[in-house]
Amino acid sequence: MFQRSRQRVRAAAAAVLLASCAHAPPPPPPPPDAPAWPPPPEIARIRFEGTFPDARIAPEKPSIWQRALEVILGIDPAEARREGLYLHRPFGIAASDRGFVLTDPDGRAVLKVDWLAAKAVPVVCADHPWEMPMAVALGPSGELYVADGGAGAVVRVEPGGACSLIGTGALERPTGLAFSSGSLFVVDPPRHQVVAFGPDGRERIRFGARGDSGSGLNFPTAIAASTDGTLLVVDALNFRVARFSAQGEFLGAFGTAGDGGGAFGRPKAIAMDAGGKAYISDAHHDVVIIFSPAGDFELAVGGSGAGAGTFTLPAGVAIGGDFLYVVDSYNHRVEVFRILGGGKP
Amino acid sequence: MRWLLASLLLLAARMALGQAGVMATKHNLSASGPGPIKSEVESQVCVFCHVPHGGRGLGNNRPLSATSYQPYASSTLVSQPPDRPSGSTRICLSCHDGTIAVGRTLASGQIPVQGTDPTGRLSLGRSNLGTDLRKSHPVSFVPATSPRFRAPPASDPVKLDGQGRLECISCHDPHSNEGAPVDGKFLVKPNRASTLCLTCHVEPAWTSNPSVHQASTATYDGPLGATTPYKTVADNACSACHTSHGAATTARLLKDGPSKVCMQCHSGKVAQRDLSADFAKPYSHPALGHEPSSHDAAEGPGNELDALPETRATARRHVECVDCHNPHAVYSNGASRRRLPGSARSRPESGLVLEGDPLAQGARLSRSFAGVWGIDRNGSKVDQAQYEYEVCFKCHADSANRPLRGPSRSQGGLRRPSSNLRLATDLGAVSYHPIQGPGRNPGVPGLIGLTETSVIYCTDCHNSDTGPGNGGDGPAGPHGSSFPYLLERNLATDDFTPESEEAYALCYKCHDRGVLYSESSGFPHLAHVQRARTPCTVCHDSHGVSALEGNPASNAHLINFDLTIVQPSSGGQLNYTSMGPRRGMCSMRCHFVEHKGTMY
């Protein structure tokens, strides 16, 4: 009996040790009644998966030991109490291997988020404090490109942390980024232009001029690249998405102003999935509108609100694997959806 | 057909407005931009915000109901905190987010980026004071009326929306820039002297005292920090310190921290005197450079989260300009500031009570404390302090976090616990400097310009060494001093200090040096202070000895020995016993001299 209790003690000790080494739990599975689009009884194409920040980064309640330590060391408990991560007004997003990279222009922060492990690491440049980081894109070798609208430049952050500026003086207020054919394409809404930079940081081409039809742009706010090199530009105040080739040739457009059936109210950002479908967030209607590769309206996801699967002024969109990330800017969070069917046509 | 109807309706609406309208403003976002109107594209100008009905009728874009949300919060907000942005405000925010138009402009205040701990987990530091402090005027809520807030009058250009909510359009008309030709920014009415803010915000002392800021014609324009086109302090009014959009991280929509914002002008730039020089001195009320502090406008004795006087020994101590001064109420009644050095006491504005002076009955209180609350002699809160010491007692009396030991000996400090100054100077204390009322000793020899029934101020001793009280022309007040303890004049506390006019200049301000070292002082001060080189503070307490800490026999005459210098006698005795006027008995050991029942 003595031996068995010793074994039990050992087992208990091992369990305690293992528990203390455990990583953060994986994301909780979506609730069984998670919203899906189209709503039942239709076959679901998009299903709500979770949010960030979520309960895994909730404030911790202090343990007895922590409280005792505070008493002994004279630490003010109100000062020591830790609170959760707060996103002031998140805006831009890009998918990364284990989650996404998020920009918060009002919080002046850029965060690398591992959504699966609930870790968020701020991206900090020693000599360039963020002014208004609006958009972010990941480069082919793991470097980050952040469009800093307040600084009028794109900041390139190497994996080791070194930062350099691209396009100083050539951009007025960059708010969107996309990689295509080896170049970085940046949209500049006040100038109604798209500017392309090569890997050396030098400007390659620049296209776009203010206009209300054809190849004219009226405050383009975001850009995405499809797998064949075509660029899709969110032409916000023309209420459409315009297609350009990587050389700047206008290829057509789709979209119209309106309040239903896939019409735009305030298109904000765009992402493309593996099958070529375009996902565009609309801040007026609080939805993400999905179009086929040909530009036909397919589905609108979301709605106004602050609960699961609803938005208040959605901003950036990004797609990583099966996940669709939507920045819900005025609800201070990112919502994660799962693309059922893998996003293939 | 529908398009034609819509454009006709819009044309009719525009003609009804009868103004040049949105065509000529920045909100004409059509590709043609502001300029000559083309009638066939008229509806194109409206569509950017007034999205037309349309689309193929497929899909479901209808908004769902709202649920709970993290609201704007402030410790002094009376109304129900605002919900998510609603109604017309959403339309504004959908462009004013940094893409099509610049969003809330970021102010000079820095928001620290959260750091991580070594494991890479986001370190969960304190969020913005624990509340969702947005840096813009709150919108999308129904404001509650209170003595400090009124609903705009019916005929006023400032309006609440159809549901009684305050939205962007309460102050801005996105269609027209003609409501405020000088201010611009689509304001509905000019904001000169902050008439726009004062439509709803009630600040009675601002006009009734009136505040010096309300009346000041000093130049304050763009290069000095003004965010309006106006060029004087009075015309800028609220906007001199507050900003509706892009405020700093501190509360109440201030442009910067609650003390830094004062330094825009009170550092020798707009106001007459330079306070930053005083704050830079080695001993000061450290209002600058310690932000964010734990100051909160709602702090007070009854507030559990922000108790003042503090109730926890571990709470942070703080000081900001606004702890002692209320910029909305502060005023001057024109009294002279000149005082002569070393002479009769500085008693600001005493006896100079002008007609209509709001503080007429509190002649003991400088007008710079108007509108400031205090802790009275009984430890209770008074909404308007009546005496100068009541302002000081907020932090230097009952606070649980007063430093328990003075600075080390090497810094010229004393080894006496920092006592509760309210109890130490109470009229029931054993012995005290007459701050709360006349002293209890009927025979104090050698007073300069005072009598035994005089009452003095904290600022008679604690003041700037370059202020008028010491013959300088710097600002008056305990902002900073080169002397320890923020003293106006030198007071040496080290043993074996050679006596001189300079060594104890603070005491000699009121206690005549000649009388002190003569027979008439009633105690052999000459032998002790001059020959034995013992400083005043070895035997005397500066403030008082409360009834809890001492007794009349041992602590008369402010006797409270500095125990690092005064040692017990060889018989283990260390005491003083008063035996009547000018008579007493001492037992201790100082400077290797024994006193065993030595009498004088």
Image (cartoon, coloured by chain):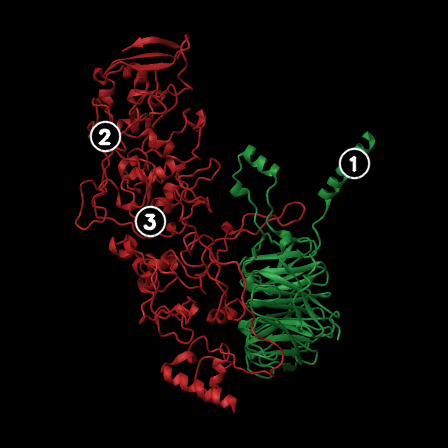
Chain colours: A green, B red
**Residue A117 in view, yes or no:** yes
**Residue A122 in view, yes or no:** no
Of badges 3 and 2, the one in the foreground is: 2
**Disc 1: host chain:** A
Instruction: Quickly name the residue at label 1.
Output: A8
In the rendered structure, the answer to whether residue A266 lies left or right of residue B211 reads right
Tell me whether circle 3 and circle 1 mark residues in contact (CB < 8 Å): no
Instruction: Quickly name the residue at label 2.
Output: B438
**Disc 3: host chain:** B
Q: Percent from the top left, x then y, of residue B575? A: 36, 14
> Looking at the rendering, which quadrant does residue B342 occupy?
top left
Instruction: Quickly name the residue at label 3.
Output: B326
Q: Residues within 10 Å of mark 2 (few under 14, many from 20)?
A: some
**Does residue A71 sit above or below B304 in this rendering?**
above
Element type where label 2 sits in the image: loop
User: Disc 1 to disc 2, how far (Cα)?
Assistant: 77 Å
